Structure formats: C-alpha cells, structure tokens
Amino acid sequence: MSVTAQGATVWLTGLPSAGKTTIAYELAGRLREAGHRVEVLDGDEVREFLSAGLGFSREDRHTNVQRIGFVAELLASNGVKALVPVIAPYADSREAVRKRHDAAGTTYVEVHVATPVEVCSVRDVKGLYAKQASGEISGLTGVDDPYEAPETPDLRIESHRQTVQESAAALHALLTEKGLA
Ligand SMILES: Nc1ncnc2c1ncn2[C@@H]1O[C@H](COP(=O)(O)OS(=O)(=O)O)[C@@H](OP(=O)(O)O)[C@H]1O
Ligand SMILES: Nc1ncnc2c1ncn2[C@@H]1O[C@H](COP(=O)(O)OP(=O)(O)O)[C@@H](O)[C@H]1O
C-alpha cells in the first residue's frame, strides 16, 4: 500500500491553547499537498454536532473522547489521516481509544502538545483562563480540573520552544519515520 493510501489516527492531546489545533491544521496542509486524504476532527466542531449537549464533567469528556475515537478509527481504517486536536484529559479515555484502534489493526499515534499551563494561560486564545481567573467559569483543564499527561507518547512537542512550522515538521518527520508520510 502506498504511504498516501494508508490511514492513521494522530491524536494531539494537551491543555487549552497548547497549540493542538494550530499544529493539526499546519500538518493537514502539508499532508494534503503530498496527496494524502486528511480530516481534522476539531473538538469545538465535534461538540456542536456529534457531541452536542455534552459538558465538561469527567463522564461527558470520556463520552466525547470515545465518540471522536470511534469516528477517527472509521476514517483511518478507510485510508484517511484523521488528525484529532482534542484535550482528552484522562489517561483511561485515551487508552480505550488506543485499544479500539489496536483491536481493528488501525495505526494510532499519540502526540502530547506539552505546553506548560503558564504559557497556555498567557496565550489564552479563547479567553478561558481569564474567565476561570475571574470566577466566570470553573473546571478548566489544567487549572481547576485534571489533566493526566501521557507518560509515553509517540512524540512530545514543546510548542513554547518552537515555531508552529518547527512543531508541524517534527510531527511530519515522525509520520515519515513510521512509513505514514
Ligand atoms: N472547562 C473547560 N475545560 C477545557 N476546555 C474547555 C472548557 N470549557 C470550554 N472549553 C473549550 O472546549 C474545547 C473543546 O474541548 P475538547 O472536546 O477538546 O475537550 S475534552 O477532550 O472533551 O476534555 C477546548 O478547545 P481547545 O482550547 O482547542 O483545547 C476549550 O476551548
Ligand atoms: N510551536 C507552536 N505550535 C502551535 N501553536 C503555537 C506554537 N507557537 C505559538 N503558538 C500559538 O499558540 C496558539 C495555540 O492555539 P490553538 O492551536 O488554538 O491551541 P489549542 O487547540 O491547543 O487550544 C496559537 O495562537 C498559535 O499561533
């Protein structure tokens, strides 16, 4: 099978504003240019439709992550590179997604976008850290809600030490190494 025809799920986990979405879209562009079929399953978009009505409790986050994992595996098993920039804060939720892929013989790559909360809260792309600080919201991942960092991700990206292009290139290089790009 050609590298462009082989599907895989690439899950980018990390805190809000870590850089998951930015890196996913930068990688998507590079892969499409090379002829790959790519879908980005963005957490915000999925929550509008597939996960409409779910909140941010442990249970709802788990359900959200399992739904996204289900769709990603379907896409990946049909030749698509499914890029998933979704927080997925709980190790057991991520493990269940990996197991679903393993059981189906579908490639699963875990990337930890490991930007420290101090940097994420300054970036604060959606203003969530400010809202948490002012008491407008609570249960923000990494601040007053858990984030269980992956212990052995396939790649750890330190986005606070790199440009977006460097981060995407590092991930692209990993996919090339694995025979996926
Ligand atoms: N309380 C709380 N905690 C964390 N994130 C929050 C919260 N409320 C809203 N948001 C915004 O929701 C975006 C999508 O979340 P996800 O579906 O990726 O989260 S999860 O995996 O179900 O935990 C997520 O998007 P990103 O910023 O792209 O990570 C947040 O901006
Ligand atoms: N190396 C990098 N990788 C990804 N994003 C970066 C990097 N350096 C700076 N940034 C910036 O950090 C922000 C990350 O936002 P976003 O991708 O929406 O995060 P997330 O999807 O994790 O919530 C963007 O404004 C992006 O330009």
Image: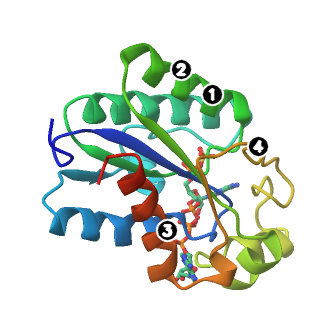
Q: Position of residue 74 (x, y in %)?
A: 29, 28
Horizontal arrangement in the rendering, residue 83 relative to residue 139 (left or right): left
Q: Pointer 4: what residue?
A: 151
Tell me the residue at 17%/64% (across/down).
34
Tell me which amino acid carries mark 2. Lys
Q: Pointer 2: what residue?
A: 99
Quarter holding the N terminus? top left
Q: Which mark is residue 95?
A: 1
Q: Pointer 3: what residue?
A: 170
Q: Which mark is residue 150?
A: none
Q: Are marks 1 and 4 in contact (CB under 8 Å)?
A: no
Q: Position of residue 111 (x, y in %)?
A: 57, 52
Q: Are marks 2 and 1 in contact (CB under 8 Å)?
A: yes
Kindly report which numbered mark, 1 or 4, lies closer to the viewer in this rendering. Answer: 4
Horizontal arrangement in the rendering, residue 31 relative to residue 95 (left or right): left
Tell me which amino acid carries mark 4. Glu
- Mark 2 neighbour class, 10 Å CA radius: few under 14, some 14 to 19, many 20 or more: some
> In which quadrant of this rendering is ligand 1 seen?
bottom right
Q: Position of residue 56 (x, y in %)?
A: 66, 44
Mark 2 or mark 3, which has the lower sequence index?
2
